[in-house]
Image (cartoon, rainbow, N blue to C red):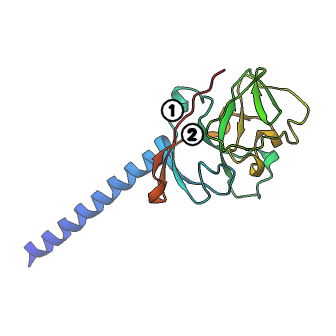
Amino acid sequence: MSTTLSAVSGFFLDLIETFVIGLSLFLVVYLFFMQPHQVSGMSMEPNLHSHDYVLTDKISYRLGTPQRGDVIVFHAPPAAHCPAGTGCDFIKRVMGLPGEMIEVKNNSIYVNGTALKEPYLPTGTETMANAFTNGRVVQLGQDEYFVAGDNRTNSSDSRSWGPITSKNIVGKAFFRYWPVPDVSVIAKPSYAL
């Protein structure tokens, strides 16, 4: 009887130990290395869709800085008017880097006077200025990034509320893992500037 009891208690202790170690590893990965995010809304269509799930790399920007074309997750700025208490995060593409001059005109985003060619946008995509960029050239500060959604007509982004800073960036979205038919690495485009 005591041998059976000892075997059962040993099994449960091993099970608890495995669970605690697994939970600890999950928390370390989640808090410091990568985190899942759900895309909410149409702002990144046709490249990412509402209800897609992506993994966000949280370590890259501790070792380096965001690059043009990176798809990033960041805490929404107050000017985005997210509902209070929602912890609202946005997912957008980095268009402008610290120190650059950004202008939205002629259906394009201009960086230092040169229109960006964006091959990931469908033909006919309209890139219009909005409240923050209408009729002005934006000079980015040394810790500011200009971001925009790929679905330019349905995106609340830097064109509306201005640049974001690195302290608000959660990380770089690098892998779409749901839905299964759309599983893919989120590619970073190259730009001719």
- Looking at the image, residue 116 sits to the left or right of residue 190; the answer is right
| Residue sitting nearer the eye, 132 or 190 | 190
Task: Residue type at mark 2: give it.
Answer: Gly
User: Is residue 158 toward the left or the right of residue 191 in the image?
Assistant: right
Figure label count: 2
- In percent of width and height, residue 107 lies at 80, 37
Q: Position of residue 81 (x, y in %)?
A: 80, 52
What residue appears at the point 74 percent right and 49 percent down from the top-left corner?
Answer: 155
Element on which disc 1 rests: helix
Q: In the rendered image, which residue does mark 2 sit on?
A: 171
Report the residue marked by disc 1.
Answer: 60
Q: Considering depth in this image, is 88 or 172 the residue closer to the camera?
A: 172
Q: Say which quarter of the image contains residue 162.
A: top right
Q: Is residue 169 left or right of residue 105?
A: left
The residue lying at 59 percent from left, 51 percent from top is 48
In this rendering, is residue 179 above or below 5? Answer: above
Q: Which numbered disc flags the more N-terminal residue, 1 or 2? A: 1
Which structural element holds mark 2? strand
From the top left corner, tell me how far across and down residue 172 is, in percent: 55, 39
Mark seen at residue 88: none
Q: Residue at x 75, y 43 (%)?
A: 157
Separation of disc 1 and disc 2 at Cα? Answer: 7 Å
Residue 18 placement: quadrant: bottom left
Q: Quadrant of the C terminus?
A: top right
Dot 1 and dot 2 residues touching (CB under 8 Å):
yes
